[in-house]
């Protein structure tokens, strides 16, 4: 078995160091991408919750308007539901953003 020279060993060590450096850079890039995906997911959840709140408010406002016009409806119930859904959504959004 032939022994490797010192310069061959140094070259191999340098190649290994370079490979480790590249792997570390790739891992850092993957971690950054994972954080970005998580951030975008949080934005999507927040948007969906805001949409749900907006839809309940739309119903509440429509029914409130119908109440002041000669139409019957349960506007106070819709208003209360919209308020409750908005509070719940806001609490969830704040909680999600605090964990970010």
Image (cartoon, helix red, strand yellow):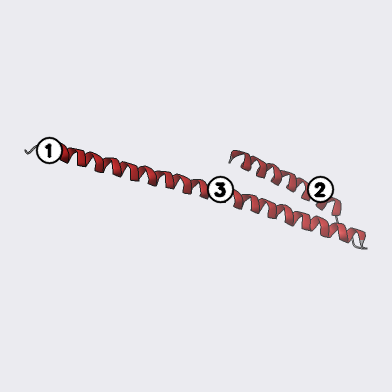
Estimate the x, y position of residue 12 in percent, counting from the top left.
21, 41
- The nearer-to-camera label among 1 and 3 is 1
Say which of marks 2 and 3 sits in front.
Answer: 3
Quadrant of the rendered structure where residue 58 is? bottom right
Q: Which of 54 and 2 lies nearest the eye of the viewer?
A: 2
Pick the quarter of the image with the C terminus: top right
In-front residue for pair 49/94: 94
Q: Which mark sits nearer the N-terminus, 1 or 3?
A: 1
In the image, residue 83 lies at what x, y percent?
78, 47
**Residue drawn 75% across the image and 54% down it:** 56
Q: Earlier in the sequence, mark 2 or mark 3?
A: 3
Q: Residue furthest bottom?
A: 70
Expressed as whole percent of the image width and height from the top left, the position of residue 73 reads: 86, 58
Judge whether 61 appears above or below 26 on screen: below
- Residue at position x 47%, y 49% from top? 33
Task: Find residue 80 and name its label.
Answer: 2
Q: In the rendered image of this protein, does residue 55 appear above or below residue 28?
A: below
Give the SS element for disc 3: helix
Q: Secondary structure at mark 2?
A: helix
Q: Are marks 2 and 3 in contact (CB under 8 Å)?
A: no
Q: Nearer the viewer, mark 1 or mark 2?
A: 1
Q: CA separation, marks 2 and 3?
A: 32 Å
Disc 1 crowd rating (10 Å Cα; few below 14, some 14-19, many 20+) is few
- Closer to the camera in the image, 29 or 55: 29
- The local crowd at label 2, few if under 14, some if 14 to 19, many if 20 or more residues have their Cα within 10 Å, is some
- For mark 3, what is the residue? 39
Q: Label for residue 5?
A: 1
């Amino acid at each position: 078995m032939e022994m490797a020279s010192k310069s061959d060993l140094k070259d191999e060590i340098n190649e290994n160091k370079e490979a480790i450096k590249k792997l570390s850079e790739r891992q850092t890039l993957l971690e950054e991408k994972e954080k970005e995906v998580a951030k975008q997911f949080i934005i999507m959840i927040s948007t969906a919750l805001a949409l749900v709140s907006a839809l309940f408010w739309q119903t509440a406002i429509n029914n409130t308007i119908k109440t002041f016009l000669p139409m019957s409806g349960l506007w106070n119930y819709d208003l209360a539901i919209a308020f409750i859904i908005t509070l719940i959504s806001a609490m969830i959004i704040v909680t999600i953003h605090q964990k970010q």
